[in-house]
Amino acid sequence: MAENNQLVKTVNLRKLFQLLLQKKKVFYKVWAIVFVLSCIWIFPQPRYYMSSVTVAPEMGGAEAGGGLSSIASSFGINIGAMANNDAIYPILYPDLFESPEFTVSLYDIQITTTEGDLTTDYYTYMKKHQQPNWLTKPFKDAIKWVKSFFKPKKKGNGDEGVSAFCMSEEDFALMENIQSNITCSVDQKTDVVTITVQDQDALVSALLADSVKQRLQDFITTYRTSKARMDVDYYQDLANQAWDDYETSVKEYSDYCDAHKNMILQANISERDELENKMSLKFNTYNAMNVQLEAAKAKVQERTPSFTTLKSVVVPVKPAGPKRMLFVIGMLFLSSVITAFWVSRGQQIMEESV
């Protein structure tokens, strides 16, 4: 019975290497062109720096899971977030950073450049003091100029500032640019929050990272203490009203006693005792409201979360990108692969083997 031998086609590497060696002049030309074009493209790209800060937020109600919480965290399950009564817990912080209201709230942050020649708010800095790519800027300006003929320009809010509810197309594009420069990531096992800021200036990126961390803490603190602060205002109003009522009853009692110094009639004595009892009741009410007010103030402090900074922000020394040399090397490698496929097409570099 005859055996069926299946032929397999393979690439003869020796023939391929010889072919590529013969076409080395083609590679030299391709490398020269790609090198020049890569340098023209990558070197005008503005450098950028990255700063990050890592914090661990206090979790209300995290004790509810007990030891089970730490065991579940090893499997990526956050029982603390489930037991927490807050609607905003760390896993939702990245969504908060994508909120237009939160992004617009960062516009008034005061920044200073590394050289110290500019001190302004973050909105003005991003809108008027960004270093453009001189290679692509003419094309962007031309496209913007052409679009201006077909689309009416929507006016901004002028002196009223930028509104997160209604903004111009230019402000909306700026907001998206800022959101891409500021990122927030959360470790689902430990709830550790990392805030990273990218900017063309090293000092600005560090200042902004620290300011964004503080804004996040203020936002969460305001949210978690909102109910307790409403209780403080409520009991403060009741205490003030109780004090006014007490002062009124004191005046009534004093005026009555002054008008009836030599009281003989039992009716006068009974009236005086009634006013005195009324004054005592008002004072007791005022004391009760004060107790409730102090308890509400203590509740505000209890609900105020603390953020433990695990890694403080540091002004970066070296730029994070663009990686110019890696880009040029990568383009040269890619062009080499494409050129190798191009010069070897149609050539006899395949051989059959059993």
Image: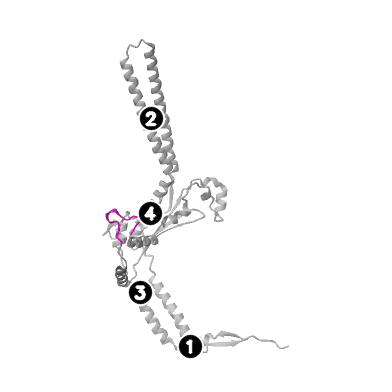
Q: Nearer the viewer, residue 292 or 333?
A: 292
Instruction: Residue 53: tell me if it is visible.
Output: no
Instruction: Residue 303: tell me if it is visible.
Output: yes
The crowd level at tag 1 (other Cα within 10 Å; few <14, some 14-19, many 20+) is: some
Circles 2 and 3 in contact, beta carbons < 8 Å: no
**SS for dot 2:** helix
Q: Amino acid at mark 3?
A: Trp
Please tell me which of labels 3 and 4 falls first in the chain: 3
Q: Where residue 43 appears, x then y in whole percent?
A: 34, 72
Quadrant for the C terminus, please: bottom right
Please tell me which of labels 2 and 3 falls first in the chain: 3
Q: Nearer the viewer, residue 167 or 212?
A: 167
- Which of discs 1 and 4 lies nearer the camera? The answer is 4
User: Which labelled disc corresponds to residue 275?
Assistant: none
Instruction: Report if residue 165 lies within the magenta region.
Output: yes
**SS for dot 4:** helix
How many angstroms separate mark 2 from mark 4 (CA)? 40 Å
- Which of discs 1 and 2 lies nearer the camera? The answer is 2
How many angstroms separate mark 1 from mark 3 (CA)? 32 Å
- Which of discs 3 and 4 lies nearer the camera? The answer is 4
Q: Is residue 84 left or right of residue 156?
A: right
Residue that extends furthest to the left in the rendered view of this protein = 117
Circles 1 and 2 in contact, beta carbons < 8 Å: no
